[in-house]
Image (spheres, rainbow, N blue to C red):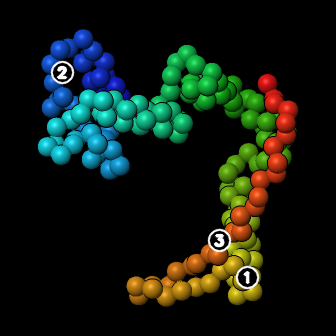
């Protein structure tokens, strides 16, 4: 957000003060473009980097736009406080869930343990997997999948 605010402040400036640009937004893949060979901030790359990182944050729901159906805070419409306490038993019954997390966590733990056990038992018989020792460590190697040919495209276009 600091980078977005910084870019907004630069609008209209003939000689933008890019040395003051917040660089926390610049991740490793962008660093060589944004900073360039002389470690000077390139405004174009900095802008695109900031926009890409902002879009990623929107997708991850780390930031929200208000008002917005698509990019708003999904928690804003949740029932909270006393209203939630009043309807919680009914909601949990309707969803077939316990009101407390302990039984749900125990069930999920059992499911995860069972999946792990089945996977470990089937590993020796799975031709698509093998364990290789490299660099002093064992690692799981998965055989790549065969490429599937795409079906011929229909001559009709969907509008």
Residue 46 percent across, percent down from the top left: 30, 33
Above or below, 82 relative to 57: above
Q: Of callouts 2 and 3, which one flags the residue occurring earlier in the amino acid sequence?
A: 2
- How packed is label 3: few (under 14 Cα within 10 Å), some, or many (20 or more)? few
Nearest the viewer among 101 and 116 is: 116
**Residue at screen point 29% across, 23% down:** 7
The label number, if any, that marks residue 126 in the structure image: 1
Which mark sits nearer the N-terminus, 1 or 2?
2
Local SS, label 1? loop
Marks 2 and 3 sit apart, C-alpha to C-alpha, by: 50 Å
Q: Is residue 113 visible?
A: no
Q: Which mark is residue 16?
A: 2
Of residue 51 and residue 64, the one placed in the foreground of this image is 51
Q: Which of pointers 1 and 3 indicates the residue nearer the eye?
A: 3
Q: Which residue is mark 3?
A: 144
* Percent coordinates x, y for residue 146 in the rendering: 71, 68
Nearest the eye: 63 or 136 = 136
Q: Quadrant of residue 123?
A: bottom right
Q: Secondary structure at mark 2?
A: loop
97 left or right of 80 in image = right
Mark 1, other Cα within 10 Å: few <14 / some 14–19 / many ≥20: few
Which quadrant of the figure contains the C terminus?
top right
Residue 37 or 99: which is nearer the viewer?
A: 37
């Amino acid at each position: 957000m600091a980078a977005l605010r910084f870019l907004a402040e630069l609008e209209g400036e003939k000689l933008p003060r890019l040395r003051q640009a917040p660089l926390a937004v610049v991740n490793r893949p962008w660093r060589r473009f944004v900073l360039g060979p002389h470690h000077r901030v390139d405004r174009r790359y900095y802008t695109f980097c900031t926009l890409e990182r902002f879009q990623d944050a929107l997708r991850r729901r780390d930031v929200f736009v208000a008002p917005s159906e698509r990019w708003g805070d999904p928690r804003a419409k949740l029932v909270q406080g006393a209203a939630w306490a009043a309807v919680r038993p009914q909601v949990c019954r309707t969803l077939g869930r316990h009101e407390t997390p302990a039984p749900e966590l125990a069930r999920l733990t059992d499911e995860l343990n069972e999946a792990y056990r089945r996977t470990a038992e089937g590993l020796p018989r799975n031709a698509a997997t093998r364990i290789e020792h490299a660099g002093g460590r064992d690692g799981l190697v998965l055989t790549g999948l065969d490429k599937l040919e795409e079906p011929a495209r229909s001559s009709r276009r969907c509008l």
